[in-house]
Image (cartoon, grey):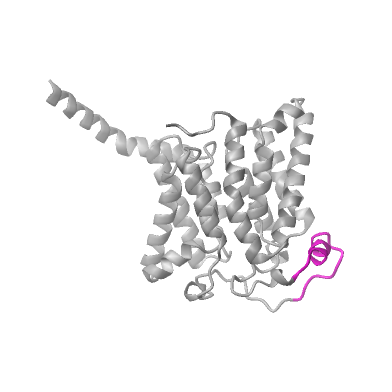
Amino acid sequence: MNLRPKSTRGIMRAVVAAMVPGTLFHALQFGPVVWLQTAWCILFALLVESIFLYGRKQPVRAGLSSLSWLVCGILMARALPLMVPVWMMLLATFTALGLVKHASGGLGCNRLNPVMAGLGVVAICFYQQLYPAPLPQAPWTLALDYQQILEQQLLLAPRLSLDSISGATPLTAGFLSDAAPYTSWLGYLAGGLLLAYIQVIRSEIPLAILVSAATLCILSGHTIQEALHNLTLGGLIFAAFFIATDPVTSPDSRAGRILYGVVIGLMTELVREFGLYADGICFAVLAANMLAPQLDTIAHSLFYPWNMSKQGSNITLHR
């Protein structure tokens, strides 16, 4: 039985529903900043989408009814670091929907993943201005109330003074042996598996990402237990199921999608092991987006001769 939604609106509603468990776990662990950031990003997504639909002389009501802006807002809120100011959320959303989506021709025409493009602008241009990521065993954001969070987001109060870790990656900071894990990955894994079950996403992409990232982690000298724990850090599982599986920016062939997932997993792990940024999933996805047509070509050249020889042998046997 095919459970896949038959309309774009139905697919977007399924993605939103699948995001709920992970977002709930994320908010329980890191506090009300998660809900406020989600509300801001959804508001900005609605605003930017409406402006660009109107500017392109597209029917605004019909364009908004697809709910793609809602999915972008929710995904952007989770992808951005916590406690970013409001203007950074607006900039990231403008980049995602305005410069990447609508400047490319609208829904289904973009070459890059809009959410990762928006995150990339913030990560590259304003990395030094971001608060350090709260650690799961002692999240400093949990002590902040709504008023304090709003004052920071709107830049109405002095910047918080935190005794925090450096920008080292989770691997070099020694977090793999930490007993307190992130909990949101459980919700995103459950939601991602649901999307795979109803055929909204292609399961070979997240599987290839997670297997390749864990394999490289083991080859880098970590234990199997550390490699598995490494998969739950940051936004790897979230991105593997909800970002990298975007059908518009991933390869068309199954073999190409497997190569695509392997590229993302390996690049993410390389940044975690040797890079300056805390997580490399953003840059890995954007690089893989650019390589998607080439990955389809490579997959075709690798597997097409084998498939043809297999079909030829089957014909011979049949005769």
Give residue 227's position: percent from left, percent from top.
Answer: 42, 66
Query: Who is closer to the viewer here, 17 or 275?
Result: 17
Quadrant in which the C terminus appears: top left
Give residue 270's position: percent from left, percent from top.
Answer: 47, 61
* Residue farthest bottom in this picture: 163
Placement of 188 over or under 3, stated as above or below: below
Quadrant of the rendered structure where residue 153 is?
A: bottom right
Left or right? Give the position of 301 relative to 77: left
What residue is at 59 percent from the left and 33 percent from the top?
A: 10
Query: Who is closer to the viewer here, 56 or 9?
Result: 9
Give residue 69's position: percent from left, percent from top.
Answer: 69, 39
* Residue farthest right in this picture: 156
Residue 114 falls within the magenta-colored stretch? no
Quadrant of the rendered structure where residue 197 is?
A: top left
What residue is at 37 percent from the left and 40 percent from the top?
A: 255
What residue is at 76 percent from the left and 49 percent from the top?
A: 90
Residue 155 falls within the magenta-colored stretch? yes
Left or right? Give the position of 110 relative to 98: left
Query: Who is closer to the viewer here, 8 or 123?
Result: 8
Q: Over which residues does the magenta segment extend?
A: 144-161
Quadrant in which the N terminus appears: top left
What residue is at 75 percent from the left and 40 percent from the top?
A: 46
Number of numbered discs visible in the structure rendering: 0
Left or right? Give the position of 183 relative to 225: right
Residue 51 visible? The answer is yes
Left or right? Give the position of 269 relative to 8: left
Placement of 144 over or under 50, stated as above or below: below
Residue 113 visible? The answer is no
* Residue farthest top in this picture: 319
Give residue 239's position: percent from left, percent from top.
Answer: 54, 52
